[in-house]
Image (tube, rainbow, N blue to C red):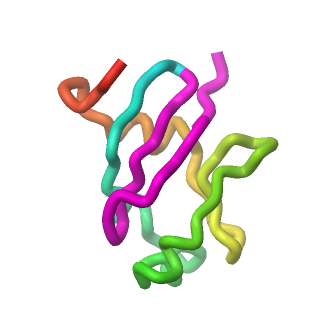
Amino acid sequence: MILHILDAELAGPFSLHLRFSDGCSATVDLRPLLTGPIFEPLLDPKVFAQFTVDPICKTVCWPNGADLAPEAIRSMVATEQEIV
C-alpha cells in the first residue's frame, strides 16, 4: 500500500497534526526533517505555516517547492503516539 497524507493541520511552529491513509493520526514536530537548502526557508514559522497537502501526490508541500514524503514523516511517529 502506498502511504498518503489525507489531512494536515498546523499544530505548532514546526508541527503538524496529520492523518495518514494507514489510519494513523498524530502530531509530528518536523524540525528534524528541515535540513538542506530547500528546507531552510521553512525554519521561519510564517513560511512553515504556508504548507498544503498536494491533492495529487498526497504529500505535505510548500510554495517554494519543498515537500516531505509521507513515509519519512510517518517513521517519526512513535507507536504510543498513534491514534488509530
Residue toward you, 9 or 34? 9
Question: Which portion, as a residue range, is magenta?
Answer: 1-21
x and y, in percent, of residue 23 in the image: 47, 20
8 in relation to 51, above or below: above
Residue 19: say if magenta.
yes
20 in relation to 28, above or below: above
* 67 to the left or right of 41: right
x and y, in percent, of residue 62 in the image: 64, 68
69 in relation to 3, above or below: below
16 in relation to 38, above or below: above
Q: Which residue lies furthest to the left in this view?
A: 80
x and y, in percent, of residue 28 in the image: 34, 48
x and y, in percent, of residue 12 in the image: 32, 64
Residue at image position (31%, 36%) is: 77
Residue at image position (44%, 70%) is: 35
Q: In which quarter of the image is the C terminus?
A: top left
Residue at image position (23%, 32%) is: 81
Q: Which residue lies furthest to the right in this view?
A: 56
Q: Quadrant of the N terminus?
A: top right
* 46 to the left or right of 29: right
Quarter residue 16 falls in? bottom left
Is residue 2 something one can see in this rendering? Answer: yes
Residue at image position (41%, 79%) is: 45
* 72 to the left or right of 21: left
